[in-house]
Amino acid sequence: MRTVVRWFIVVVVLGHGLIHLLGAAKGLGRAEVAALPEPIGPAMGLAWLAAAAAVVATGVMLAVRNRRWRVSGAVGAVLSQTVILTSWNDARTGTVVNVLLLAALGYTFASRGPTSYRAEYQRRTAAALRESHSGPGAVVTETDLAHLPDLVAGYVRRSGAVGQPRVWSVHARIHGRIRAGANARWMTYTGEQVNTFGPAPSRYFWMDATLFGLPVDVLHVFAGPAATMRVKLCSVVPMANAAGPDMDRAETVTLFNDLCILAPSALIDAPIVWQPTDDNHARGIFTNGAQTVTADLTFNDGDLVDFVSDDRMSMSRDGSTFTPQRWSTPVRDYRTFGSRRLATHGEGRWHITDPQGQYAYLEYNLDAITCTPQDADRGDAQSISTNADPTLEKVDSRKRMIAG
């Protein structure tokens, strides 16, 4: 629930609960209340007091983000509406607040309950991380870089991979803004992403965005051979549902992109055919299942600064159609976190017809990233956390990489 909305509901609910004390005061003979001319007996006075307590408790718990506000809110709404019905002519206006409270409870269930995108993301990532953690991972050596083009090997080396265990998963938290077109309104968002590597790589990305003050939930799932992308407004109204071969291909490009930006050390074992092109560029041909995609990587002073592919198609707003379009992700602001060195800011760009026609539809900053390698000797998991500013995503780690 957005902060402004939450505090609005807190103020309204607290005021609503306190007003119930008027009914309690009249019913218990503590005061004459001109606003409630209808008779209220002692028993109903206690009911009004109980409703006041439940509703005020709801407001307080919602203010301090105590999850039990949902239980007290449901109880409070029922008690409040019950006493309002007994004094309908005097108190019916309070029904509006109870409807607001029930709507807040409904949204909370839709956005965080067992059927929500958030809950699905958590279930899927927990299962993927359990399944991906199998067998010890060897420490990266200079010998492991020998089959890579010099530009790629230098980039992997600069990322801090040499001397560290191979990474088998990445968990990133990001924030930024996104829009549907060059002239569309920007939406702010926070996001969370998990990638696992190995023979069956996976990618899960959950985004919590805001459009015109309303929440928008986005869930990307790429597990096995198929990818999906679903969007809901207010966690209830479907806005997009993308799936099919075009979506699979688009997400395969994103897997490759994640690999390059968030998990450079995983490039060592990924199924990529490399083709060096000049002193600053290398072409990678990445295969995942039935999909094979190509991207041109640009390097500057040893760092990756851009990733360009013609294989990632732009999608219509409802996810029903895809249009071939050049896609790029310029990145910058490298920082060292623990033993890993990564870019901390980037963009997603569509190129309409030429470089002058390109526009950024996504801006991202990495807030935290955890790489989970395995110790080659002990075989137990280690985490490397980073707090800073970028992200795109992460990927696969399979056996087979050929230098072109």
Image (cartoon, helix red, strand yellow):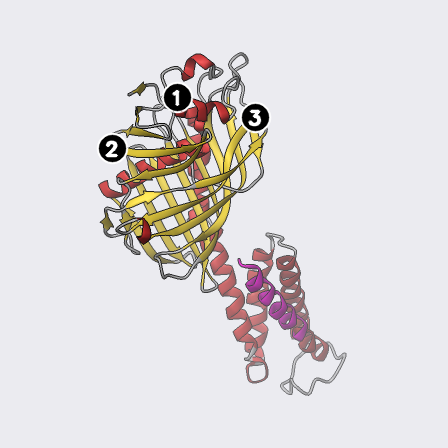
User: Could you tell which of marks 2 and 1 lies nearer the N-terminus?
Assistant: 1
| Vertical placement of residue 153 versus 193, above or below | above
Mark 2 or 1: in front is 1
Between the residue at mark 2 and the residue at mark 1, the CA separation in whole angstroms equals 26 Å
Between the residue at mark 1 and the residue at mark 3, the CA separation in whole angstroms equals 21 Å
Q: Is residue 302 visible?
A: yes
Region of the chain picked out in magenta, as a range:
1-19
**What residue sits right under mark 2 in the picture?**
291
Does residue 104 show up magenta in the picture?
Answer: no
User: Could you tell which of marks 1 and 3 lies nearer the N-terminus?
Assistant: 1
**What residue sits right under mark 3 in the picture?**
339
Between the residue at mark 3 and the residue at mark 2, the CA separation in whole angstroms equals 33 Å
**What residue sits right under mark 1 in the picture?**
150
Mark 3 or 2: in front is 3
Residue drawn at x 47%, y 59% is 107
Q: Which element type, helix, strand or loop, lies under badge 3?
A: loop
Number of residues whose C-alpha sits closer than 10 Å to that of mark 1, classed few (under 14), some (14–19) or many (20 or more): some
